Image (cartoon, coloured by chain):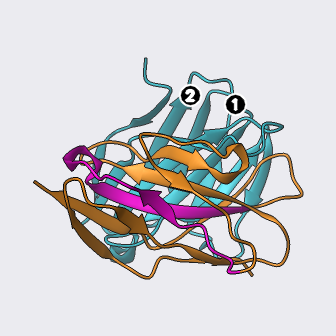
């Protein structure tokens, strides 16, 4: 009955080798978020989708891209991972119009860059 | 700019003792405040939100606009409350809210 699913849970990639992380949801929420969480730090928002509208945070590096082919799925693409991109990546969803109800998080994908 | 500060990285209390996790924020306007919790090996999940003024698992949090605080309190902490707690802020004005998180406080409740 998982509502926000992230695959894979653990991803190992090589320096500079593109990698894609995926997120799917069964909640039919129209907003999906991607956060980066480095060790011992707070989650930091990278970008979000409101339906098909993509919203990038000002300080998100160009190396990070995202795709949302439909309501249920959202992907995070890292074009050329560096050692500093090793982190936990969290996907979250929210139903717009229900302000104050909070976001639902997936379990995260831990990315290791060798 | 919006900011959330959790001054304590670690908080240790004994079972049955009160626990208070501090959260201060800065935001030019009326924010929405949340507490999220992450138990060991589990996903981040919403604990409570100020807008609903609810008590969840014995925890309460009151928004103090004068002190710009949203401290989380539990009068009698239990071992199962041991977890990482994040205070988070979302600006109003849209129908959904991007979250700014504090650094988190690890609560350990000793038997």
Quadrant occupied by the N terminus of chain B: bottom right
Query: Which residue corresponds to the image point at 35% horizontal and 63% vertical from the top-left?
Result: B19
Query: Which residue corresponds to the image point at 54% horizontal and 42% vertical from the top-left?
Result: B55
Could you tell me how far apart the alpha carbons at marks 2 and 1 are, in whole angstroms?
8 Å
Q: What is the x, y in percent for residue A85?
A: 40, 70
Q: Which mark is residue A54?
A: none
Q: Chain of mark 2?
A: A
Identify the colour of chain A in the image.
Answer: cyan
The residue to which callout 1 is attached is: A29
Residue range in magenta is: B67-90
Q: Nearer the viewer, residue A38 or B1?
A: B1
The secondary structure type at the circle numbered 1 is loop
The secondary structure type at the circle numbered 2 is strand
Hey, which residue is sitting farthest right in the picture?
B93
Hey, which residue is sitting farthest top in the picture?
A1
The residue to which callout 2 is attached is: A25
Q: Is residue A15 left or right of residue A18?
A: left
Identify the colour of chain B in the image.
Answer: orange
Q: Residues within 10 Å of mark 1 (few under 14, many from 20)?
A: some
Query: Which residue corresponds to the image point at 68% horizontal and 77% vertical from the top-left?
Result: B68
Q: What is the x, y in percent for residue A23?
A: 51, 37
Q: What is the x, y in percent for residue B34?
A: 60, 55
Q: Is residue A55 left or right of residue A112?
A: right
Q: What is the x, y in percent for residue B77?
A: 29, 53
- B95 shown above or below A27: below
Q: Is B80 included in the stretch rendered in magenta?
A: yes
Q: Is residue A14 in sight in this rendering?
A: no
């Amino acid at each position: 009955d998982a509502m926000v699913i992230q695959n894979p849970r653990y991803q190992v990639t090589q320096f500079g080798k593109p990698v894609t992380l995926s997120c799917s949801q069964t909640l039919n929420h129209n907003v999906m978020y991607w956060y980066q969480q480095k060790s011992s730090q707070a989650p930091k928002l990278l970008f979000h989708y409101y339906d098909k509208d993509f919203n990038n945070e000002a300080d998100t590096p160009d190396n990070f891209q995202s795709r949302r082919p439909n309501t249920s799925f959202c992907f995070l693409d890292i074009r050329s991972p560096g050692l500093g991109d090793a982190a936990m990546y969290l996907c979250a969803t929210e139903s717009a119009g229900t302000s104050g109800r909070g976001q639902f998080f997936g379990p995260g994908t831990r990315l290791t860059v060798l | 700019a919006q900011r959330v500060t959790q001054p304590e990285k670690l908080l240790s209390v004994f079972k049955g003792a009160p626990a208070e996790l501090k959260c201060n924020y800065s935001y030019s306007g009326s924010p929405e405040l949340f507490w999220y919790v992450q138990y060991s090996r589990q996903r981040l999940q919403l604990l409570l939100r100020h807008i609903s003024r609810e008590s969840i698992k014995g925890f309460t949090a009151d928004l103090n606009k004068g002190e710009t605080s949203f401290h989380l309190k539990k009068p009698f902490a239990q071992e199962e409350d041991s977890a990482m707690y994040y205070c988070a802020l979302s600006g109003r004005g849209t129908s959904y809210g991007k979250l700014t998180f504090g650094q988190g406080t690890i609560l350990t409740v000793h038997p």
